[in-house]
Image (cartoon, grey):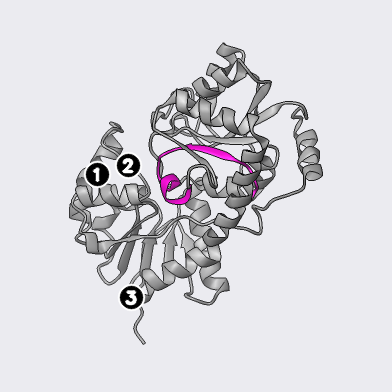
């Protein structure tokens, strides 16, 4: 099998590399991660990015191949021409695609509404590498904070995502990711608590600029490389997902695996994975007041925070990449293998 990944060192690439590695290590299916489908014949080709397939590649993929497409998120609310064009193209392209994979119930329902045949859709969530993302002791957390230059006596609130348009400074916000909501929530929390925002990732210019306007302290680390992000979670007291639209995000599993209590809007996988009050807290979309209230409950109620972490660590065991990769094999790839 060939798993088509993007060249950018970000989520699509990380997922493709994990699936490819686990397919090979578990000896399920010989898999190669690549960023081209040229000259491939009589194989399974899994397009990990809708951008690769739907912009035009679906017309050029050799018909001898079996085609799998992962569609993680998209909405008519996102008026960017490329997004609307891919939604419009989807039904026609699906005549050539054998399986549409998605990671959450919300996206599954959208695909059906856009004309994708229900029988072609397979729902398998994202996974998490539990060897990299794991819980550490308080002493280790303090050491990591010191290394990063984060004050020990502040409440550290994290947001690790790309929420600016493009791969430059990111001064224009990608509103589906909710950077404006994140800034508003953190600003309101800062009025009552001694907090610092810890933001990670490329194109965070909008968030940085808006936090500076409000006088909210923050630390930005632009370190790239997925395996490096685990240590950054260890510096957090709370993780916030304020998005309007998501396919995952991976962050909900990574936060659970590293023992960080989290608050998330009801996007992507969050309603599928988070049981409100058990292993995380859920908020309605764009509800700043609710997000602030839920975050406040974690800050003030140490027992609640402890229980959310403990139950999150139990939950996330079901999402190891080993288990998720086996599901990919059993529910998608095995149907194309003849003996």
Left or right: residue 141 versus residue 176 is right
| Numbered mark located on residue 74 in the image | 2
Q: For mark 3, give the secondary structure.
A: helix
Q: Residues within 10 Å of mark 1 (few under 14, many from 20)?
A: some
| Numbered mark located on residue 13 in the image | none
Rendered view: 335 above or below 17:
below
Q: For mark 2, give the secondary structure.
A: loop
Q: What residue lies at 66% left-to-right and 40% top-to-bottom? A: 303
Q: Position of residue 257 (x, y in %)?
A: 61, 51
Number of numbered markers: 3
Q: Position of residue 263 (x, y in %)?
A: 52, 37
Do labels 2 and 1 touch, CB within 8 Å? yes
Residue corresponding to mark 3: 335
Return the disc, 2 or 1, that comes first in the chain's sequence.
2
Q: What residue lies at 63% left-to-right and 30% top-to-bottom? A: 299
Left or right: residue 91 versus residue 315 is left
Q: What residue lies at 79% left-to-right and 38% top-to-bottom? A: 142
Cα distance between the residues tagged 2 and 1:
8 Å
Magenta stretch holds residue 271: yes
Q: Residues within 10 Å of mark 3 (few under 14, many from 20)?
A: few
Return the disc, 3 or 1, that comes first in the chain's sequence.
1
Tell me if residue 169 can be seen: no
Pick the front one: 293 or 332: 293
Q: Which residues are magenta?
A: 258-274
Residue corresponding to mark 1: 87
């Amino acid at each position: 099998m060939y798993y088509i990944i993007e060249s950018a060192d970000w989520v699509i690439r990380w997922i493709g590399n994990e699936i490819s590695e686990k397919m090979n290590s578990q000896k399920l299916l010989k898999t190669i991660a690549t960023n081209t489908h040229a000259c491939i014949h009589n194989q399974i080709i899994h397009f990990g990015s809708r951008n690769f397939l739907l912009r035009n590649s679906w017309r050029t993929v050799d018909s001898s191949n079996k085609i799998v497409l992962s569609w993680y998120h998209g909405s008519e609310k996102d008026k960017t021409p490329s997004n609307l064009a891919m939604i419009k193209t989807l039904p026609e392209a699906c005549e050539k695609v054998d399986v549409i994979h998605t990671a959450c119930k919300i996206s599954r329902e959208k695909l059906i509404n856009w004309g994708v045949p229900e029988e072609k859709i397979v729902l398998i969530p994202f996974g998490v590498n539990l060897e990299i993302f794991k819980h550490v002791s308080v002493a280790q957390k303090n050491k990591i904070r010191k290394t990063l230059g984060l004050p020990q006596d502040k409440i550290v609130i994290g947001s690790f995502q790309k929420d600016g348009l493009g791969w430059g400074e990111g001064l224009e916000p990608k509103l589906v990711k909710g950077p404006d909501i994140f800034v508003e929530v953190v600003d309101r929390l800062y009025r009552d608590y001694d907090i610092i925002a810890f933001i990670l990732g490329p194109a965070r210019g909008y968030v940085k600029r808006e936090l500076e306007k409000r006088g909210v302290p923050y630390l930005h680390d632009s370190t790239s490389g997925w395996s490096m992000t685990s240590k950054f979670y260890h510096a957090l007291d709370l993780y916030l997902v304020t998005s309007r639209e998501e396919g995952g995000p991976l962050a909900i599993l990574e936060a659970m695996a590293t023992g960080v209590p989290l608050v998330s809007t009801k996007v992507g996988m969050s309603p599928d994975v988070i049981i409100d009050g058990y292993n995380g807290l859920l908020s309605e979309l764009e509800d700043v007041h609710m997000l602030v209230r839920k975050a406040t409950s974690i800050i003030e109620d140490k027992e609640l925070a402890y229980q959310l972490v403990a139950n999150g660590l139990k939950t996330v065991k079901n999402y190891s990449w080993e288990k998720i990769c086996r599901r990919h094999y059993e529910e998608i790839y095995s149907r194309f293998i003849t003996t």
